[in-house]
Each structure stands twice: as C-alpha cells, then as structure tokens.
Amino acid sequence: MMNPLRSRANRIQARKGNASAPAPLDALAPPPAGDYAAFLAATLPRQASGVSRHRFGTQRVWLKKAGPRHAMWRYHLLAAVAKAFRLDVLTPVPNPGGEAAIEIEARRLGALGELGLRVPTVLARQAGGVLISDLGEGNLAPIVLNERLDQAAAVGPVALLKVWREGLDAIALVHARGAYLSQAFARNLMYCPDGTIGYIDFEDDPGESLALAECQVRDWLSYLHSTAALLHAASPHGAGGQWHAVLADASDEVRERLAIAARRMRWLRHLPANRRWGRDTQRVRAVARLMSRWYSPNFDPTTTMSAPLSKR
C-alpha cells in the first residue's frame, strides 16, 4: 500500500523543482582578503534582489539589502484575529523594512551569537545592507529543516517525529538561555553540517512590543504552524508526547499561555478542509486540531514513548 506521507513528500518536491536548489553564487571578484566592508560597499549597489548569496574568496556569504516597508494591511488583519480571540501572542509585530530591518537583523544576530547560539556572523554592515556568513562548512551547505522534515515524512512517522523533535529542542535551547527567535518557522531553522541547528531571519523583533513569555509562545506556535499538517498526517499522539516532554522545561507562564491559546483556538479545527480556502487556512486548522487533542483533559502524553531531551 502506498505511504501517504511519501506521496505527499514527492508532491512537495515536484512543486519545488529547481526552486529548492541552492541559489547560484554570484561570480564577483572580491576585494583584498578579509575586507568585508569593501566587498559590501562594492556589491550592494549592484544587487537587485533583497537577499543573495555570493562568493568571497573561498567563503559563501549572504548580502541582505534593505527593502520596502511591508504592507500594513497584513498586520491589521492579524491584529483583528488576535483581538477577536483574545490572543496577545498573535499580536502582529510589523517588519519595518528598509534600513530599520537591516539594523534589527544585525543587532539580533549579534545578541543571539553572544549567547552561544548558532546564527550567521555579521561580517560587515552599512546603511542599506548587511553582509553575513553562511551556516555551512567548507563545501557543505546547511539544509533547511523544512526539507529534512519532507524527506523524513517519506520514510515514515518515526523518522518524521525524530526530525521534528530536533526542531523542538533547538527552540527550547534558545528559550533556556533567556532568549527568543523571531519567526520560528521550520524554514528558518537550518540543519548545519555538524548536526547543530542554526537560526536565520531576524528582520523584526517581537521583544520590542511583547513580554518574553509572549515572544517564546509565538516561537512555539510558529513552529507548530509550519509543521502541523505533516504531524496530523503522521502521528498526532506521538507528536503530542514530544511536545509536552520538551515544554516540561518551559516556564509556567509559557505553558499557561499555550494552554489558553489551545482553548481559544479550539473552534478553528472546524474550518473548511477544502484546499480552495488556501494553504494558511489549512495550516491554522491543523494547528487547532492538534492543540485541541494535546490539551484535552483525556490526553495522556506519558502513554507515548518520548525521546530523551538533548543537552542544553
């Protein structure tokens, strides 16, 4: 019998096509070795895209260029949803765009790096752009966790839960050091060649408008939002055991806020299953269905064998 998870992963890869392949490195002659600032100054005016990967000597580097401010209508819609369900953790954190977003990115990368977390290193910065390191090693590039999840899903539920747990542990590590991410979706978690998970994309800062516990709850919900559909098709109960095992180390406030969110999102599990309503609708529905199950009085996570927590 055909494995539905394998079929789904094959469809995903088919949709990605060449888009999932690494972006080509721009063939630019670098300035003298180590002069990152000069390279940034020379390359920034010539880069058309917002983010591009370049070759600097033997290194892969990324240049992020200031872009336009994000449309505010997106935030008004999310704000209305957060208000309707009394979910402060969903209060939108606008991405300011432009030079402000570049400044936030550089600042947050520096702060997280000082905590010993795996993030790109800021190599050079100027008004309108920042040059950062790649999370690969030598000729080995990092793998987006999204892709590892798709590959694991094609193998089966056990493999999928193992990779999904690695993402949970990576987020828990950040929280254990008194920090938070920004958009903790699986696409922003990078599996590095040495097995460590790194973090990218910090153009906004939830901590500027939300308390620490709210920022950390946003991280958990973001990760679940980006993975819930896969989990629901694989092993919802097993995933719930992993979820509660990792969150046992979270603060009481974080666990309480997640339980509140589960109750207030409960009715969203009845959203239409028809795909014509859009991918985000299906993801929200999947999150609500999982949270409803995991926070039900009848759910017992101890009946599921949980993998040991990784060292922090």
Image (tube, rainbow, N blue to C red):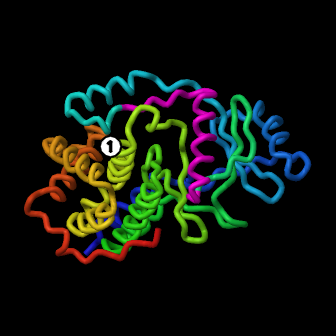
Toward the right, the furthest residue is 32
81 above or below 133?
Answer: above
SS at circle 1: helix
Counting from the top left corner in percent of width and height, residue 101 is at: 58, 32
Q: Left of 134 or right of it: where is 201?
A: left
Residue named by callout 1:
279
Front one among 63 and 89: 89
Toward the left, the furthest residue is 298
Label 1 crowd (10 A; few <14 / some 14-19 / many >=20) = few
Q: Residue 150: in sight, yes or no?
A: no
What residue is rendered at 34% in x and 60% in y? 8
Front one among 230 and 297: 297
What residue is rendered at 62% in x and 34% in y? 102
Q: Residue 296: in sight, yes or no?
A: yes
Q: Which residues are magenta?
A: 92-118
Q: Is residue 106 magenta?
A: yes
What residue is rendered at 54% in x and 67% in y? 196
Give the position of the N terminus as an image quadrant.
bottom left
Q: Left of 120 or right of it: where is 195?
A: left
